[in-house]
Amino acid sequence: MKEKATYENGKIVSKVITYHENGKVQSETEYKNGLKNGAFKQFYTSGQPEITGNYRYNRQIGTWKYFDESGKIIKNTVYRNGIAVAE
């Protein structure tokens, strides 16, 4: 797996992009001061979205959507401070 990120003082300070072996994007994760903070997207090897959601201070927040390989939403989970509170 390949990864693209920007570091300052040993901490990740940018969007981290990882790639599948076929060269397509595997995931995109926003970071701030070394912590996951912002949008998260994970993709199948086909390039279709697999998971979308948000982080705040390394914890999952809000509604996370899970997709099948055709792009259909198969599950929504609501997180509060990293804990699933509703599906």
Image (cartoon, helix red, strand yellow):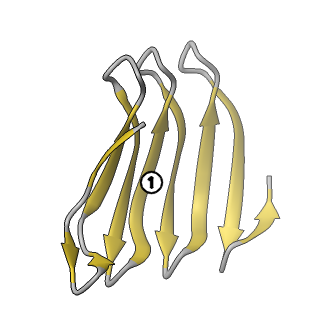
Compared to residue 55, the image places residue 35 above or below, namely below
Q: Position of residue 44 (x, y in %)?
A: 51, 24
Determine the residue positioned at 25% across, 58% down.
5
Q: Position of residue 43 (x, y in %)?
A: 47, 31
Q: Using residue 56 as the reference point, say whether residue 10 is left or right of it.
A: left
Within the image, what quadrant is residue 25 found in?
top left
Determine the residue positioned at 60% across, 57% down.
63
Q: Using residue 15 as the reference point, say whether residue 18 is left or right of it.
A: right
Mark 1 crowd level (few <14, some 14–19, many ≥20, 10 Å Cα):
many
Compared to residue 35, the image places residue 30 above or below, namely above
In the image shown, does 57 or 67 lie closer to the viewer?
Answer: 57
Query: Could you tell me the amino acid type at mark 1?
Result: Phe
Q: Using residue 63 as the reference point, say whether residue 28 is left or right of it.
A: left
Q: Secondary structure at mark 1?
A: strand
Number of marks in picture:
1
Within the image, what quadrant is residue 30 found in?
bottom left
Mark 1 = which residue?
40
Determine the residue positioned at 60% across, 43% down.
65
In the image shown, does 32 or 82 lie closer to the viewer?
Answer: 32
- Quarter of the figure with the N terminus: top left
Q: Position of residue 72 (x, y in %)?
A: 60, 21
Q: Position of residue 3 (x, y in %)?
A: 32, 46
Within the image, what quadrant is residue 16 found in?
bottom left
Compared to residue 16, the image places residue 44 above or below, namely above
